[in-house]
Amino acid sequence: MSEKNKPENQKITDLKMHHKDGDGKILTTNQGLKVNDTNNSLKSGERGATLLEDFLLREKITSFDHERIPERIVHARGSGAHGVFELTASIPQFSKAGIFNDLKRKTPVFVRFSTVAGSKGSADLARDVRGFAVKFYTEEGTWDLVGNNMPIFFIQDAMKFPDIIHAVKPEPNREIPQAAAAHDTFYDFISRSTETLHNHIWAMSDRAIPRSFRMMEGFGIHTFRLINEEGEAHFVKFHWKPILGVHSVTWDEAVKINGADPDFHRRDLWDAIESGQFPQWEFGVQIVPQADEFKFEFDLLDPTKLIPEEMVPVQIIGKMTLNRNPENFFAETEQVAFLPGHIVPGIDFTNDPLLQGRLFSYRDTQLSRLGGPNFNQIPINRPIVETHNNQRDGMMQTEIPKGQTAYFPNSLGGGCPHLSKISEGAFHSYEEKIDAKKIRERSESFNDHFSQPALFYRSLAKWEQQHVAEAYTFELGKCEHEYIKERMLWLIAQIDTDLAAEVAAGLGLKIPDAIEQPVNQAIGADAEVERQQPPAQKNYLNQSPKLSQANTKFDSIATRQIAVLVADGFSMQHYKRMADALEKEGAVLKLIAPHGGVVICDENMEYAVDASITTTESVLFDAVFIPGGKKAIDKIKQEAKFLKFINEAFKHCKAIAVNEEGGSILDETYVAKHKDDKAVLINQNPIEFIKAIAKHRNWDRIEVAKNIPV
Ligand code: HDD
């Protein structure tokens, strides 16, 4: 996207003050000294030793030596983008926040998507929760909504966060495995902490291997509060709903994508924005009146529980559009600091014990990650409004506060900076009545660990359930200790016996009648043992259809990547007809040929090849089209990789369209016996192909697909 077409907003303007562009400029030192040689160090003679005097060498090397900062302890791998949030329905009855009332505002946002467990350089398609963190630069200060792509969390109390993260991260003795939960320490922990089972079954579902960041839901997870002008509170859960629907890849694809393009999600986000196909989400709220706090059969403060949308509908009140890529990965995506403690008047916290712990952790972690308390002065972290207070000095202070005073109250500084009234927009914590004993306990009301995992599983389509069973089987199959697998099997059986039976068969184990060791046998943890015994499941809702990806949107092929398999002599007519129809709907066609460079169609015109078959893979595309042209098809048939490409697309339940001679290729593949498949389109109108791609996958093919040996 050209510089002049890039969308602007108040935060972008602010960041521009810090842009640096060396284009057409002379190379200098950090002091502005012009440099005429940056290739050779200063030596005593041409072949002599390097001199300590060489300040040019020292400046360059010192800077390089310190280029890295500690990666995030979790969510180290991420991709960011700028955008804008617009309100579509104001909610003054619930919140006085400007962002929820002013329909004319375009609030700048910066969003960072991430995986949780892997290191900064890990591959994008790990089976993992995805972070979905949004920084709203509002006129009343910055609000950070630091959420995930799943609506619940693994644990109920922040006290357990270091434990679960240590369990999922590579094992400390040998630093294995990278970006994978499938190992003993994770399942040792999970099977001893049954509160994790709800988030865990989501992680076993397709939600953990998204097709794109742009096709994920986002959730604030915790119950927050909204506060109106009268000071009245309502409970709220925040939701992001992608315009393109929620779609995922299969596990077999995920494994292969990680090799073929480890940056698959990062590239997909970047390319979509660069091409002007801006990712969008609707923003919604689930509102619960304070008076209904105890109306549910779960605790609103328990972050391992969702409120089914069938019980409390999501009201859509806004829209977010990501429309500009960062200028510099490190300066923006790496240095951005999200803090759940960043809120604005009209929004407040609840006593969710996980949220309360987060309010400490995020500020604390920035101190070591970004080097001190002034991380808020880094351009990407600066609010768009002025800030004034008596905080001073510290590492990397970049501001020059004027005046004699740095305390409050003062008279020497004229009492400034002075306080604001609540009526003039000052933040005022919600005055929650508290009359309680100080205790280190978990509330009884947090104890139901099985009803919602079971509700989730019951709500999935057959093919989604099958994917869950396969995921459990894979993950537990990677564990080495049988008793850990057995304990997991027993716990899965408490969620669904058929699911457990399928996983057990895959593992070659039996579901134990009881767990030999208690669920939690840690010394001194009797109360925990008691607490974690599965109580009878509550069935307050048989199914929640909104939880299934089978009920998402299937109305667009915008940004879908279509592989067009060609060689010299391909039919231009077939290609043009299909390309015109698909591109009109926003799809992106890529020509894959036996070689790079150009291919010549049957009407002697040259087309640039997007990728040679040796440099690309079927898993990177959403659908395959093979135009006719006898000469081309004969060539394509000779390349085994083309046949693998088609077989894999078929295995992954993707739409395949062929014209005329193109159809004869199918006879060389596993598609031959399945030409009646509804997403295999032979000489059909492009509209049928468009419909099949919009369906994302033909999951009816799943049983056939299992037996395709590629
Ligand atoms: Fe966290 C980063 C999401 C619980 C401690 N978390 C981090 C990021 C996301 C989340 C999206 C990456 C932000 C970015 O892109 O920079 N975390 C969550 C959600 C949680 C959650 C949705 C539960 C509902 N987190 C959680 C707990 C703790 C932390 C309970 C600690 C007690 N999280 C951190 C952290 C990180 C972080 C260590 C690492 C880097 C950072 O904060 O800035 O402080």
Image: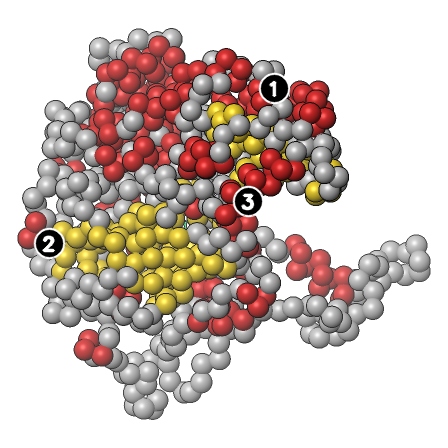
Circle 2: element type = strand
Q: Nearer the viewer, residue 227 or 668?
A: 668
Image-quadrant location for residue 185: top left
Circle 1: element type = helix
Looking at the image, do the residues carrying marks 2 and 1 touch, with CB atoms under 8 Å apart? no
Q: Position of residue 417 (x, y in %)?
A: 33, 83
Distance (Cα) linking label 2 and label 1 = 63 Å
Q: How is the image coloured?
A: secondary structure
Residue 37 visible: yes
Image-quadrant location for residue 669: top right
Residue tagged 3: 580
Name the amino acid type tagged 1: Ser
Residue tagged 2: 289
Q: Nearer the viewer, residue 326 or 644?
A: 644
Name the amino acid type tagged 2: Pro
Give the quarter of the figure containing the C terminus. top right
What residue do we see at 24% from left, 75% from top? 425
Distance (Cα) linking label 1 and label 3 = 24 Å
What residue do we see at 26% from left, 58% from top? 317
Circle 2 crowding by C-alpha within 10 Å: few under 14, some 14–19, many from 20: few
Left or right relative to 189: residue 705: right
Which-is-in-front pick, marks 2 and 3?
Answer: 3
Q: Nearer the viewer, residue 204 or 628?
A: 628
Residue 171 visible: no
